[in-house]
Image: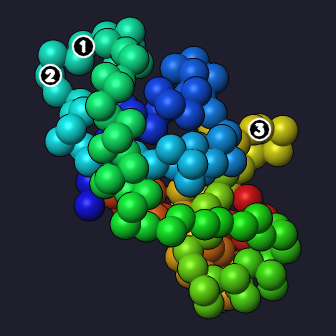
Amino acid sequence: MNFSDRFLAKTSGTDPNSGNTPDQVLETLRKIGVPLQERWDFSPDIDTVEKFYDNPPPKLFDYARQDFLDIYNFKYEDVPTDKETIKKALKCSVIGVGLVAWFQNNNGIYYSPKGTSANHFCVIYGYDDEKQAWKIFDSYDQSIKILSFDH
């Protein structure tokens, strides 16, 4: 299923300059839902930030319920950030992670330089104890990455 990024960005209060928080987006998805992408698409005529963040037509809120909330019982929970708890939680689900995009060491492992703030959100789907790293899926570029446990 492909859902409308524009709708979720607008209704969750995403700021084009400073972004948003995962909790705010997740709560919006849980309470309001999201319509299918085709109902409020990102097309070539959306050529400004203002057009992207235009107010959605009221009917889209009905579609958000119909396309998402009436089908899915969406829930989430915070997971403590220690390595063992994350590994245990991965037995139940992927885990969202805020991180710094993208600094890579000589071994091809991504990391967050000290003093930097998270500016990107991905999912952890596994781990590699030998490399001391998380297996990450980045939906932005549809790629698999390896992120240091100490990111």
Q: Are marks 3 and 1 in contact (CB under 8 Å)?
A: no
Q: Nearer the viewer, residue 18 or 112?
A: 18
Residue at which label 3 appears: 116
Q: Are marks 1 and 2 in contact (CB under 8 Å)?
A: yes
Q: How is the image coloured?
A: rainbow
Residue at which label 2 appears: 44
Kindly report the distance in space between the C-alpha atoms of the residues bearing marks 3 and 1: 31 Å
Q: Quadrant of residue 130?
A: bottom right
Q: Earlier in the sequence, mark 3 or mark 2?
A: 2
Label of residue 47 in the image: 1
38 relative position to 81: left or right: left
Which dot, 3 or 1, sits closer to the camera?
1
Kindly report the distance in space between the C-alpha atoms of the residues bearing marks 1 and 2: 7 Å
Q: Residue at x 26, y 61 (%)?
A: 1
Mark yes or no: residue 149 visible: yes
Q: Secondary structure at mark 1?
A: loop
